[in-house]
Image (cartoon, helix red, strand yellow):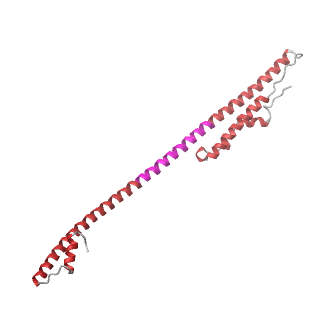
Amino acid sequence: MRKTMITSPSAMKYAPDSSNYSNADDESESDIFNRNQIAQNSVDSLIGTMKSITLPSIKPQSNAKQRINTLEDATLTQYKLNEMTFDTVGKLSSELINTEDHIKQIIQQLTDNFNNQLRALRIEYDHRFDLQRAENKRLKDGFAALKEESSMTIKKLNLTIEKLQEVQTELGETNDNDDFAQLARVVSRGKTV
């Protein structure tokens, strides 16, 4: 009598079915995790089945032909189990390679996205730096022009005050407290009115 679980339909479920998986490029991280869980469950189930297989015992009262048939049946059972195990390990190995490739693609994509964002930030930084440098130069030039204009205005104002004082002196109207005298003192100290 043969005692084996290999011939049962449920025993054939141990190898993961690759038709259940979508294209590796379209998978999310949770899909990869689910696939890994399915593969782990397949291995665990296969190991459980291998532990639970009971090989037929050889009865001492059987003749040599019965003993040989029993050993052949046990060998066939073990061969089928080994074949199923080999197929499962091959499929899992293939799935591992696919998962590794997919993870490499994800890492490459993240690296490329990071580098592109960094490049865009660098371009934006350089552009803003150039704008700020141009604005600083414009302000510096404007300040220099205003300073020069202020200096020229003070010189003109001093000349005008001197001429007005000369006119006042010629007219005989000299007063140190008048507006021109006060303006001359303020301008001579470098202040503007």
Residue 36, position in %: x, y? 66, 40
The residue furthest front is 176
Please tell me which residue is depicted at 57% across the width and 41% down the height of the picture: 103
Q: Is residue 95 left or right of residue 108?
A: right
Q: Is residue 31 above or below residue 63?
A: below
Q: Residue at x 79, y 32 (%)?
A: 7
Highlighted magenta segment, given as a residue range: 95-123
Percent of width and height locating residue 53: 79, 28
54 relative to 161, above or below:
above
- Residue 15: % across, % down: 70, 36
Quadrant hosting residue 67: top right
141 sits left or right of 90 in the view: left
Is 58 covered by the magenta stretch? no
Residue at 82% from the left image edge and 21% from the top image edge: 70
- Counting labels gives 0
* Front in this rendered view, residue 103 or 127: 127
Tell me what residue is drawn at x 33 percent, y 61 percent: 135
Which residue is most to the top? 64
What's the magenta bit mostly, secondary-structure-wise?
helix
Q: Is residue 106 magenta?
A: yes
Q: The C terminus appears in which quarter of the rendering?
A: bottom left
Q: Where does residue 61 sit, x and y in percent of width and height?
A: 90, 16
Which of 174/150 is in front?
A: 174
Quarter-of-image position of residue 10:
top right
Work out which residue is located at the far left of the displayed protein and give it. Answer: 170
Q: Where does the N terminus fall, quadrant-wise?
A: top right
